Amino acid sequence: MPPTPAQKRATFFTLHQSGCFVIPNPFDVGSAKYLQHLGFKALATTSAGFAWSHGVADNKVTRDMVLAHLRDIVGAVDVPVNADFEGGFAHDPAGVADNVKRAVETGVAGLSIEDFNGNPSDPLYAFDDAVARIKAARKAIDETGANVILTARTEGYCFGRPDLAETIKRLKAFADAGADCVFAPAMKSLSEIEELVNAVAPTPVNVGGAVFGWSVEKLSALGVRRISLGVGLARAAWTDFMRVAHSVAETGSFDAFGTVTKTDFNAFFNSSSS
């Protein structure tokens, strides 16, 4: 029998108690199944990877599209799934709370709420508003009775505001507001990551490790609890797709195609469905 949502959530909770684990980000059911096949203990969705698969930019998919995507991914794998739930698809705390409850209903073991407000020129919610949104998400999860991990994200480093002091201030406040894990995407300095980990301890810290040449061993030694790949895998898939497509379009040659065959793919997906 496949594990129940409650069992997946218990597993995910345990993963956050000690050690360090990698949580890669599939962008569709096929990539989720393959990552589970490789032995990863948990998966996380990627807002950008999912958006690109629908031919739109990041932050341009609807709440209902994301909820359907979460049901698909959760239903396809036996490992816990964390939802990239963007900003909760609402500005006000009440709207965030309502949408968080809808996300919990999909069976996810965790979800993240970020403080990006949709305005790149002034990208972050005001401090008090950002904290209120995390409090609302926490209360909504508690009201469902589900043991869902809440990750709170601050996006300053993603939008040209690499202010470590402000990042620590926000993440500590988010932890006090009920976040179980905190995350500041796009941090590039190991010394700053170490300072952040120490400042918010004992709250677990997620780090995005897909692009900076780091290793699990190095980040684990800094006290990082969770390492996500963000849009890294989707970007890698699109990079190879574009490379091959450009080669055919520009040279008329088919030499750029890879060596994994249709038979190989069918063999894997037949076995994963049995």
Image (cartoon, helix red, strand yellow):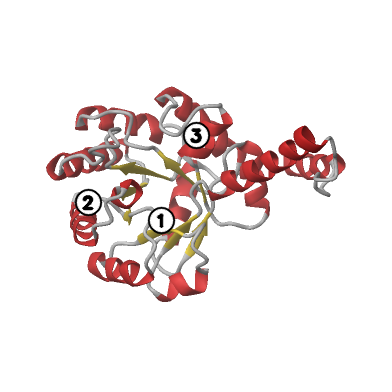
Calculate the distance from the C-alpha at mark 1 to the C-alpha at mark 2.
18 Å
In the picture, which quadrant includes the C terminus? top right
Report the mark closest to the observer, 3 or 1: 3
- Residue 39 seen by the camera: yes
- Residue identifier under label 2: 174
What secondary structure is marked by label 1? Answer: helix
Q: Residue at label 1?
A: 13
52, 90: nearer the viewer: 52
CB-based contact (under 8 Å), mark 1 and mark 2: no
Residue 52 in the image: above or below residue 186: above
The residue under label 3 is 70
Q: Nearer the viewer, residue 24 or 185?
A: 185
Task: Tell me if I can see residue 154 in this picture.
Answer: no
Q: Quick check: 194 above or below 250?
A: below
Picture residue at 43% right of the left edge, 60% below the top: 226
**Which badge, 1 or 2, is on the more N-terminal residue?**
1
Q: Nearer the viewer, residue 225 or 27?
A: 27
Does the residue at mark 3 contact the one at mark 1 (Cβ under 8 Å)?
no
If you read the primary sequence from the N terminus, does the residue marked by circle 3 or circle 1 appear first?
1
Residue 15 in which image quadrant: bottom left
Q: CA gap, disc 2 to disc 3?
A: 24 Å
Judged left or right of residue 168, residue 60 is: right
